Image (cartoon, helix red, strand yellow):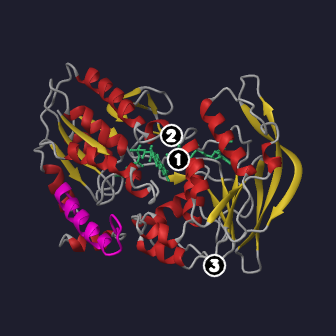
Amino acid sequence: MRVAIIGSGPAGFYAAEALLKRADAVIDVDMFDRLPTPYGLVRGGVAPDHGKIKTVIRVFAATAARPTFRFLGNVCLGRDVTVEELRLHYHQIIYATGNEADRRLGIPGEGMTRCTPATVFVGWYNGHPDYREAKIDLSVRSVAVVGNGNVAVDAARILLRTPAELEKTDIAAHALETLRNSQVREVFLLGRRGPAQAAFSPAELKELGTLEAADAIVAPGELAGYAGNESTGDTEKDKNLKILRAYAAHPARTDAKKLHLRFCVSPTEIIADSAGRVAGIKLERNRLETRPDGTVAARGTGEIETLEVGMVLPAIGYAAERIAGVPYDEKARIIANENGRVVDPASRAVIANEYAVGWARSGPQGLIGEHKRASADVVAHMIADGVGLDLRALPGRDAIVALLRGRGVQPVSFSDWKQLDDVEVARGARRGAPRDKIVDVEAMLEVLGQG
Ligand SMILES: Cc1cc2nc3c(=O)[nH]c(=O)nc-3n(C[C@H](O)[C@H](O)[C@H](O)COP(=O)(O)OP(=O)(O)OC[C@H]3O[C@@H](n4cnc5c(N)ncnc54)[C@H](O)[C@@H]3O)c2cc1C
Ligand SMILES: NC(=O)c1ccc[n+]([C@@H]2O[C@H](COP(=O)([O-])OP(=O)(O)OC[C@H]3O[C@@H](n4cnc5c(N)ncnc54)[C@H](OP(=O)(O)O)[C@@H]3O)[C@@H](O)[C@H]2O)c1
């Protein structure tokens, strides 16, 4: 059996592992990625100061070392190769393309200069080639980060870390340079619901209290209803509340930068200065309403305040990009699927031998480790569907490479990636960092002698 996996993030690698560990079948796996570098958001999303989490790439590298695994980086499905061509060259296809688009607030002023979605800011500081040219202007004193998830926390933390804290990480050199000259003194983290509904996890929230030159600040009024020992009935949320209470009780240092955690506010408009750049954000105060199903919704009260900030970073979630030829669920903004089996979005009929895993399958929720089980479950469907499958003869395994080269595409192999890896690690050693990323695809190909 020959399988194509599109996307080399955690979900793709865990699917490859589940396929290649099977003792009852010989499976050739070709893993494609549009970038020359593997690992998806582990490289391009996980914050640079969270190096420990990135050690998971050792597990993925072990999968890549299996004899029937092949990496074909620098190949974009929908641009360099079509779904039809994959169907000719493979018995089964797994889409593991993640969620690379951002969700929008949908308010006036969104999109003006210095209103930058988290996808862009995160990609920029992580050296993702798509965002190396992003204009991030940190000459402003105050920034509003919209959202109460872990991505919002990452963005706020990176804005407030000192250069000394950042230079020993794998942050992109261009971002480190800009952050060295940052004028940002104050960040507002804005949640539309209350402290008991915030999506961030306790470990991430607690870390905000350990920043060298910034204090996490919670005005006591923000914890109304939770000022004592009230329990939400949810251990994680209770841990968050305990940490927030500690922030509320802790006196802020006078000379420290400030991270204000605000709740129950929704942006209604972004205000421009005379040059058309962000000068402020209008916020509507919300009240919380419990729905019949027990979930809690934010409802606007009509009470508006204006926060003077020079930059707005909406971090309100990701969505899957549409890929030509791949069935797309418009509403959920994921690949149309039922339990990982790709379906026609209108009829919901199963499209044989095509599967989706990871965020492409389920949307932008969940941690790296959770994909191990989830991808293995989809592989179990594949094996079940493949039993008795008439394994038609395919073109030779190298035919796909010849096809790509014939159209001027230069696939990057896993040993090519290891070469890039060595170069990045050696560059990083000069500043005492684990790596200094190459952020330009052309430059990567130059290193490989393919530029
Ligand atoms: C900013 C951020 C920080 C995070 N930090 C953490 C953390 O600290 N800890 C944690 O556990 N989880 C973290 N997560 C969550 C974690 O990153 C995700 O759960 C996980 O990466 C999703 O895996 P995936 O394989 O579905 O997608 P991805 O990791 O996004 O991988 C998708 C891959 O598909 C490729 N691709 C896309 N389109 C195409 C195409 N058309 N052709 C070829 N290739 C394509 C991409 O280049 C990419 O390599 C974070 C998420 C974000 C957004
Ligand atoms: N260190 C880590 O472990 C780490 C780091 C980063 C990301 N991750 C993971 O990656 C996944 C994605 O993280 P995420 O932060 O992008 O998503 P998330 O956890 O879903 O958080 C999104 C946040 O945006 C808010 N939001 C959505 N629409 C909004 C709107 N229109 N106006 C105002 N606020 C809005 C949500 O509020 P509501 O709750 O009210 O909808 C929520 O607070 C999560 O599973 C996360 O845990 C983990």
Judge the density around disc 1: few (<14), some (14-19), many (≥20) Cα neighbours within 10 Å: some
Q: Nearer the viewer, mark 3 or mark 1?
A: 3
Q: Are marks 3 and 1 in contact (CB under 8 Å)?
A: no
What are the residue bounds of the magenta stretch? 409-437
Q: Position of residue 76 (x, y in %)?
A: 33, 55
Q: Residue at x 39, y 46 (%)?
A: 97
Residue assigned mark 2: 363
Q: Secondary structure at mark 1?
A: strand
Q: CA distance from mark 3 to mark 1?
A: 30 Å
Q: Quadrant of the C terminus?
A: bottom left
The amino acid type, in three-letter code, at marker 3 is Ser
Q: Earlier in the sequence, mark 1 or mark 2?
A: 1
Q: Position of residue 371 (x, y in %)?
A: 39, 36
Q: Nearer the viewer, mark 3 or mark 2?
A: 3
Residue assigned mark 1: 319
Q: Are marks 1 and 2 in contact (CB under 8 Å)?
A: yes
Residue assigned mark 3: 139
Q: In the depicted view, which residue is nearer to us: 369 or 93?
A: 369
Judge the density around disc 3: few (<14), some (14-19), many (≥20) Cα neighbours within 10 Å: some
